[in-house]
Image: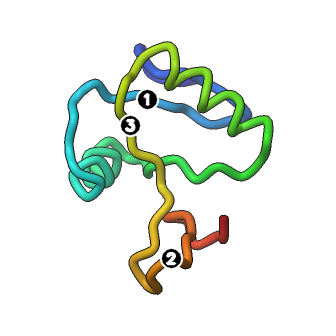
Amino acid sequence: KCENGWSQHGGHCYLVGLQLSTWDEARWDCKTRGGTLTSIASDLEESFVSETILQSAHAFWIGGHDRRTEANYMWVDGSKF
């Protein structure tokens, strides 16, 4: 069960933060809450995340990055796009 204010989908809990910040700040905020930025693993999860974001936020961060190699994106959990 997810905490109050969070959404549940596929055994995971999601929280859309309302505070604008940098990607690093958003990642740190997730870490302090015991989570991570979202790594999208399926079309179903992508649909859920997209709908959730569209209903509640104008700007958002997800867990994709190209920090190791420019233009070679991966998720924060280490999986590839």
Q: Is residue 75 left or right of residue 10?
A: left
Instruction: Provide the residue designation for mark 2.
Output: 71
**Residue at figure coordinates x 61%, y 21% from the top left:** 51
**Residue at figure coordinates x 25%, y 58% from the top left:** 24
Looking at the image, tell me whether mark 3 or mark 1 is earlier in sequence order: 1
Q: Is residue 11 left or right of residue 2?
A: right
Viewer-proximal residue among 48 and 34: 48
The reply to whether the C-beta atoms of the residues labelled 3 and 1 are less than 8 Å apart is no
Instruction: Provide the residue designation for mark 3.
Output: 60
For the residues labelled 2 and 3, the Cα–Cα distance comes to 20 Å
For the residues labelled 3 and 1, the Cα–Cα distance comes to 11 Å
Looking at the image, tell me whether mark 2 or mark 3 is earlier in sequence order: 3
Instruction: Provide the residue designation for mark 1.
Output: 15
Closer to the eye: label 1 or 2: 2
Q: Given the image, on which type of amino acid does mark 2 rest? A: Ala
Q: Given the image, on which type of amino acid does mark 1 rest? A: Leu
| Relative vertical location of residue 22 with respect to residue 15 in this rendering, above or below | below
